[in-house]
Image (cartoon, rainbow, N blue to C red):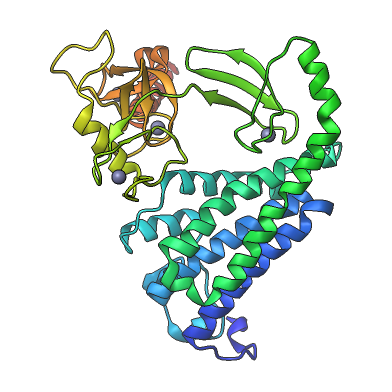
Amino acid sequence: MARKWLKQEKRTKEQLFDALVKNALGFVETSLDHVKERPKNSIVDLYTAIELFLKARLMAEHWTLMLSKPETAELQNLYVGDFLSVYLDDALKRINSILGEKIDLAASDNFKALGEHRNQIVHFAHSGHDDLAATQAGVIVEQWASWHYLYAMLTDTWKEVFEPYKIELQKLNHRMMRQRDFLSSRFTILKPKIEIELKRGKTIIACEHCELKSAVVNKVHPWGTDYSCLVCGVSDTAVVKADIKLPCPGCNEDVEFFDAKFTECPTCHFAFNTDALIDLCTAHIHEGDQWWEGGAEHIASCHECECPRPSVFYIDGLWSCVSCFDRGWQAVACERCGEFVTGDMERIKYFACHKCEDQVRQGIEAMVAAGAATEESQDAKEQP
Ligand SMILES: [Zn+2]
Ligand SMILES: [Zn+2]
Ligand SMILES: [Zn+2]
Ligand SMILES: [Zn+2]
């Protein structure tokens, strides 16, 4: 390989780690710089930063872990910068399986969604008719969400690893938070439009993404309210709140735990991650809905977030997932695989549930292939 002959400085592992992190910090910086002029580049840069930070985390454990194929690792190549490194999906898997660290499902889902958006931007041409201000607002909200998870990992979960970069991270966090001014000024500009919607008889609620009172209600369901936000352009469903309190395992005080932002007990600071919430509900909730028969399974697997542990409990009149906090789906035992799952009832009945879907699809493909083969042999026989 010619590249190996390039004159490159040999770098020690520590230097390489430092270079990776500085590179990542630089991409967060440019992500912020780009919001005004080229908002879409902000998404691409922030995604690159996330990948670099995850690589750095893996590298801190062992340098081979950041390579796409650790089994072919050669330290020499690393020193001269000649290697293929791991991508987001694999990095997340390795952090979980090799480091034994659980990345919050909401965080990994967010990073993957950002990755999909990044791919759309990189691979598909855009019409160029986008409203720049609206795009900016949407990008800021997306940046915020991803940064929220990333910053928590870097300064809390992996505090020791990234300690030397604490000040830089804090500075970036401040810059990120200052973007709020942009959204507020956009809100002021859009105020007349919001007034018009109100006069038309529309209901305006607080947007869950930009947190401004600029979301126009489209449809109200028993499980939540569909809205489109005028400021940040996000359309989503505000899921109806679950009125439930359960005693904290740490201090026995009742806590309102059904909230994606709830991470610790306000009294004793007991940490509530997904596992802790599932444990809490398992200990206190023992029944399903009106169709549920005593003795049957009462904790369903969630088709929305596909949390590995069953995470959907019957809370305050609706099936409610304590992993992704979605509510209002129905839950049934799948007739094909027997798993107790949430999902679209028609789909489960006539096709499959999220647990057995791959298997059913493979079965259908095999059947189609076999059918095609018989047809072919029939054709062969019919030929004179
Ligand atoms: Zn909004
Ligand atoms: Zn507590
Ligand atoms: Zn879920
Ligand atoms: Zn099934």
Tell me what residue is drawn at x 38 percent, y 13 percent. Answer: 350
Q: Which residue is depicted at the point 39% across and 32% down?
A: 258
Q: Quadrant of residue 190?
A: top right
Q: Measured from the top left, where is residue 283 in percent x and y?
A: 19, 33
Q: Position of residue 344 (x, y in %)?
A: 42, 17
The answer to which of 8 and 262 lies nearer the viewer is 262
Image-based side of 220 in relation to 159, left or right: right
In this orientation, which residue lies closer to the viewer: 214 or 275? 214
Q: Is residue 195 left or right of residue 21?
A: right
Above or below, 262 relative to 99: above
* Residue 126 in sight here: no
Q: Is residue 347 visible?
A: yes
Total marks shown come to 0
Q: Where, quadrant-wise, is the C terminus in this rendering? A: top left
Residue 55 appears at what percent x and percent y? 49, 67
Q: Say which of 40 and 336 sits in front.
A: 40
Along the horizontal axis of the image, is 25 left or right of 303?
right
* Looking at the image, residue 200 lies above or below residue 359: above
Residue 3: image quadrant is bottom right
Residue ID at (78%, 17%): 197
- Residue 364 locus on image (x, y percent): 37, 23
Which quadrant of the frame does ligand 3 lie within?
Answer: top left
Q: Is residue 374 above or below residue 267?
A: above
| Residue in the picture at 42% in, 67% down | 69
Residue 380 relative to residue 297: left or right: right
